[in-house]
């Protein structure tokens, strides 16, 4: 089997001694309690979990904003928790694992879109002609080419997030972590960002870790991880994970509305599958079921 | 009955400068008493400007804002009192906490209203109850609480003023599904008991379907649509065209209809969808 892009072994973390972070629940010392997982190159993984479950902490550990209390993290086979890591090694990890945050207004630094996208590669010391190429490529990848010379404050939330994503792409990452990057957007902004994320994953082979509270977005992933109380409690395809309606409710989560409807109809004795995710799939199954039942009556 | 109303309101930021921007463009819309009205629209459509006009934080460039039929910006109107009557909870209100204890923070508004001690105490208890916070937290510093708890304290501070019109801008933003349900469910319980006017701004169509009675849809500073959730969500295409959406369950009903199943398409909650399917099949399938 190919080497996983990211490997996490028995990872624990507590904020004791660290600056307490916004949004971390309670006084529980360990935010992460022994997480182990592998992320394959090119996969699209969604991470779900209630507020304070440890999702964002895990993300910040993966690109070395935080340092683990114990346990190991391997990026492309390299142990990044090794105390012998040099500063250059750390920069390399942060380049290859990019991160896009929640608030579109807190991530843009320049007054012109293309300068903002160039900020990362400039800091990496990329030669100017190469920066030009990367910036153009990154803006094209997120569909923002025509806004290259606009000022970021004139953009919508979805457009700002796409510029933030372009800024990461220009650093040629292997993986991008989206930490609730759609939470503050309106429905159209969400659609724009989710389409961009899917395209980057499929067409450019960028590995995606997407943290969200939106169950519909999670149905688009190859794999869904559910974290609760600092532990990995569910891990599977969206179909497998969302068929556990009751289990998800106990960890403060929900299922897509179509999945919930099918679960309610099953309780009423309807012979329907319990792992339906999308409205088109649901409509196919339900219309066929209703027609067959008409015949038998 | 109409409680608060905008009549032909235009609002321009930085008028007379090259940066002049028309945020509201001659909008007329009324919000009903004893209802939760959801206010939805694309980012930048003027929702935040509109809510700030309702409690006098902004003054219209043209047009009039009426509360109980009276011009809120009339000469000599006490703006302080207006803000006691029209309470506004901003986005991410947890960043506005400042007192030493939860109880003091919640008491800040009622104290400024000049209420007596017992009444303030009663208001604190009432507010804590609706936001689902335990009384034992009263003496705790709000800064020692989790993000979700801080949010509730901030909302409680406005509920304690018992405003006639309560406006909340994305009160559940960034919360997980159970946190959303607790906060929005508490707001609904509060509204059902007080029978006041609540205006809820949110980008989540699912939350709107679950908690709002009526919807107001804005587009580029103008009123696009207004009606019950059923009336508005039945127009899925029009909502998508203005950058919004309908709940997934409404899309399922549309998809069934396109496949020739004679379902109603003005359905917007899972419970309604289940009833509709049961209606079509003549009841449960239990043997």
Image (tube, helix red, strand yellow):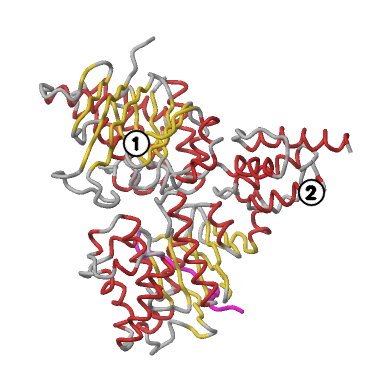
Mark 2, secondary structure of its residue: loop
Q: Is residue A202 visible?
A: yes
Q: Nearer the viewer, residue B92 or A122?
A: B92
**Can you name the residue that lies furthest to the front here?**
B287
Which image quarter is the C terminus of chain B in?
Answer: top right
Chain under numbered label 2: B
As drawn, B40 above or below A169: below
Res A8 quadrant in image: top left
Asked if residue A43 lies left or right of residue B271, the reply is left
Q: Does residue B65 lie above or below B252 as drawn? A: below
- Callout 2 environment at 10 Å: few (<14), some (14 to 19), or many (20+)? few
**What residue is pinned by disc 2?**
B283
**Overall secondary structure of the magenta section:** strand
Q: Disc 1 designates what residue?
A: A231
* Extent of the magenta region: B1-18
**Which residue shows up at 60% across the image and 49% down it?**
B246
Looking at the rendered structure, the secondary structure element under dot 1 is strand
Q: Is residue B7 magenta?
A: yes
Q: Is residue A67 left or right of residue B247?
A: left
| Mark 1 crowdedness (10 Å alpha carbons): few <14, some 14-19, many ≥20 | many
Label 2 – label 1 distance at C-alpha? 42 Å
Residue A17 shown in magenta: no
Q: What is the number of callouts on the image? A: 2
Determine which of the numbered discs, if any, sits on residue A43 in the image: none
Image x and y of residue A211, in percent: 39, 38
Where in the figure is residue A2, as x and y percent of width and height? 37, 11
Taking depth in this image into account, of B119 and B168 the one nearest to the observer is B119
Instruction: Give the residue at x 54% y 48%.
Output: B243
Q: From where the camera sits, is residue B234 visible?
A: no
């Amino acid at each position: 089997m190919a080497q996983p892009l990211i490997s996490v072994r028995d990872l624990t973390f507590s904020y004791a001694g660290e600056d307490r972070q916004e949004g971390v629940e309670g006084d529980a010392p360990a935010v992460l309690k022994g997480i182990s997982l592998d992320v394959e190159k090119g996969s699209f993984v969604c991470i779900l979990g209630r507020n304070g479950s440890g999702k964002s902490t895990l993300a910040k550990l993966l690109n070395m904003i935080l340092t683990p209390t114990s346990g190991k993290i391997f990026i492309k086979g390299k142990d990044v928790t090794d105390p012998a890591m040099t500063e250059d090694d750390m920069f390399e990890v942060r380049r290859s694992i990019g991160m896009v945050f929640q608030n579109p207004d807190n991530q843009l630094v320049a007054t012109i879109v293309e300068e903002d996208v160039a900020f990362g590669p400039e800091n990496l010391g990329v030669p100017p002609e190469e920066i030009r190429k990367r910036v153009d490529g990154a803006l094209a990848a997120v569909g923002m080419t025509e806004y290259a010379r606009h000022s970021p404050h004139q953009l919508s939330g979805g457009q700002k997030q796409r510029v933030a994503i372009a800024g990461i792409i220009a650093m040629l990452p292997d993986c991008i972590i989206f930490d609730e990057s759609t939470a503050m957007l309106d429905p159209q902004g969400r659609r724009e960002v989710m389409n961009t994320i899917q395209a980057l994953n499929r067409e450019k082979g960028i590995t995606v870790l997407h943290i969200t509270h939106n169950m519909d977005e999670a149905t688009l992933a190859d794999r869904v991880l559910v974290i609760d109380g600092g532990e990995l409690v569910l891990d599977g395809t969206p179909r497998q994970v969302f068929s556990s309606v009751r289990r998800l409710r106990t960890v403060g989560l929900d299922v897509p509305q179509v999945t919930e409807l099918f679960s309610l109809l099953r309780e009423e004795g309807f012979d329907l599958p319990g792992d339906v995710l999308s409205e088109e799939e649901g409509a196919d199954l339900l219309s066929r079921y209703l027609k067959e039942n008409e015949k038998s009556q | 009955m109409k409680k608060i109303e905008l009549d032909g309101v235009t609002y321009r930021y930085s008028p007379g400068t090259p940066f002049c921007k028309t945020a509201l463009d001659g909008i007329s819309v009324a919000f009903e008493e004893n209802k939760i009205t959801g206010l939805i629209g694309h980012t930048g459509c003027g929702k935040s400007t509109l809510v700030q006009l309702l409690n006098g934080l902004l003054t219209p460039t043209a047009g009039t804002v009426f509360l109980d039929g009276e011009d809120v910006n009339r000469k000599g109107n006490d703006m302080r009192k207006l803000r006691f009557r029209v309470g506004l909870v901003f986005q991410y209100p947890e960043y506005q906490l400042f007192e030493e204890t939860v109880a003091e923070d919640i008491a800040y508004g009622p104290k400024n209203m000049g209420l007596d001690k017992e009444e303030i105490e009663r208001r604190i208890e009432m507010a804590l109850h609706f936001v689902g916070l335990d009384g034992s937290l009263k003496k705790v510093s709000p800064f020692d609480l989790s993000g979700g708890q801080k949010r509730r304290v901030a909302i409680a501070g406005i509920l304690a003023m018992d405003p006639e019109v309560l406006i909340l801008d994305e009160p559940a933003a960034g919360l997980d599904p159970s946190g959303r349900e607790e906060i929005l469910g508490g707001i609904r319980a509060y509204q059902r008991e007080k029978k006041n006017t609540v205006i809820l701004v949110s980008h989540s169509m699912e939350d709107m379907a679950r908690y709002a009675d009526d919807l107001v849809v804005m587009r580029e500073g103008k009123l696009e649509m207004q009606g019950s959730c059923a009336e508005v969500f039945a127009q899925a295409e029009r909502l998508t065209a203005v950058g919004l959406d309908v709940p997934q369950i409404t899309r399922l009903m549309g998809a069934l209809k396109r496949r020739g199943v004679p379902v109603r398409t003005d359905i917007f909650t899972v419970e309604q969808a289940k009833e509709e399917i049961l209606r079509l099949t003549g009841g449960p399938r239990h043997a």
